[in-house]
Image (spheres, rainbow, N blue to C red):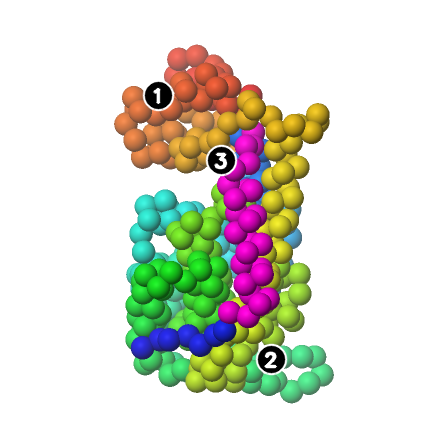
Amino acid sequence: MFKPQYKLTNKIVQKLTAIAEAKAVIGGAKLLPTAEVKLRRQALVRMTHNSTAIEGNLLNLQQVEAVLNNKTVRAPERDIYEVKNYLKAMKYIEKIAEKNKPVSERVILDIHKLVTAKTLPTTESGHYRQGPIYVINQRAGFPSEVKYIGPAFQQAPSLIKNLIHWLSQSQEDDINPVIIAGIAHAEIAAIHPFNDGNGRTARAVATLLLYRLGYDFRHLFALEDYYNKNRASYYKAIHLGKNYVERQTDLTSWLEYFVNGFAYEIENVKFEVLRLAISKAGQVAENKVYLTPAQLQILDFLSSIGRLTINDAMFILNCPRRTAQLYLRIMKQKKLIKAVGQGPSSAYVLP
């Protein structure tokens, strides 16, 4: 069975304490709905850009934003697919977290299928590898170097199942969610269960675990930012040995890196939230309101498409027409949206 080895060093404990303090501040801050939606979209764009860039994707932040807005982007087809795929994977993990579904083997395979759609053969996308796997370090002017050899492909399914079992047990053992996410990230990278897309899958699963375990920080963070700022440090931290057995020895150094990166990102989120939550007079505005999940979905759609109909709301919220009309009426009363047009052409836009 999987039993990760690590120590909770003073560095880790200090950073976990700082994260918990920031969590309380971010969770209690009152933000204008439009400001919160903007921050969430920025986090989604940063998350997608950086996670795919780590793997060599060449799209910049502006191009990722354009893809999110369904605009035409001139770039290699594979790069565009990778960005679209990761955006879909992020939407998927949001739904899994909202429904409080556990992270299962099926969920991990589905995430991999989403991040590799149209970039891997259908026989490989969402399926375990059927052969050996090597991580190769290639540098111009130097011979290729094998940095890591994954476990035999026959072991991958059972190793993932062992991880799933540990994840279910870890919550009962009251392990900090940040530690759980960091360990899951490292273990999927160590198993390397797929022919490609292992890093993106590992990072997406770590984010899903944080969302599920109450550390979603209103979906305003993008931990991938920290990794991509210094890829060499990320690669050095995650490569704990030349094979799977060596990687099981001690995860402490990786967890110090992971927790430090998370604390760094959350401090940035806290600073931005406090900046937006404080009025010009220096007082927290009393008229700022929280958003319900349904309102966030509607505003997120509007910020992307610009216009929403009753039928759009029914589809987005998966609810009957009367329920959708009620949601929209309440949002209109709160001046979160405004109605335009009449009759069949009536719709809603941002005010």
Q: Which mark is residue 137?
A: 2
Residue 68 shown in magenta:
no
Percent from the top left, x then y, of residue 150?
A: 44, 81
Sooner in the amino-acid sequence: mark 2 or mark 1: 2
- Can residue 204 be seen from the camera position used here? no
Quadrant for residue 2, please give it. Answer: bottom left
Q: Quadrant of the C terminus?
A: top right
Where is 243 relative to 237, above or below? below
In three-dimensional space, the C-alpha distance between marks 2 and 3, rounded to whole angstroms, equals: 40 Å
Percent from the top left, x then y, of residue 45?
A: 57, 48
Q: Which mark is residue 300?
A: 3
In three-dimensional space, the C-alpha distance between marks 1 and 3, rounded to whole angstroms, equals: 18 Å
- Can residue 161 be seen from the camera position used here? yes
| Residue furthest left as drawn | 320
Percent from the top left, x then y, of residue 34?
A: 56, 30
Kindly identify the residue that appears in the image at 40 percent across and 18 percent down: 329
Where is 294 relative to 40, above or below? above
State yes or no: discs 2 and 1 in contact (Cβ < 8 Å): no
Residue carrying label 1: 326
Q: Nearer the viewer, residue 80 or 200?
A: 200
Q: Nearer the viewer, residue 141 or 23?
A: 23
Sooner in the amino-acid sequence: mark 1 or mark 3: 3
Which region of the structure is painted magenta?
8-32
Q: Is residue 217 left or right of residue 319?
A: right
Q: Quadrant of the N terminus?
A: bottom left
Q: Which mark is residue 230?
A: none
In three-dimensional space, the C-alpha distance between marks 2 and 1, rounded to whole angstroms, equals: 57 Å
Q: Amino acid at mark 1?
A: Leu
Sooner in the amino-acid sequence: mark 2 or mark 3: 2
> Badge 3 local density, few (<14 within 10 Å), some, or many (20+)?
some
Where is 30 relative to 269, above or below? above
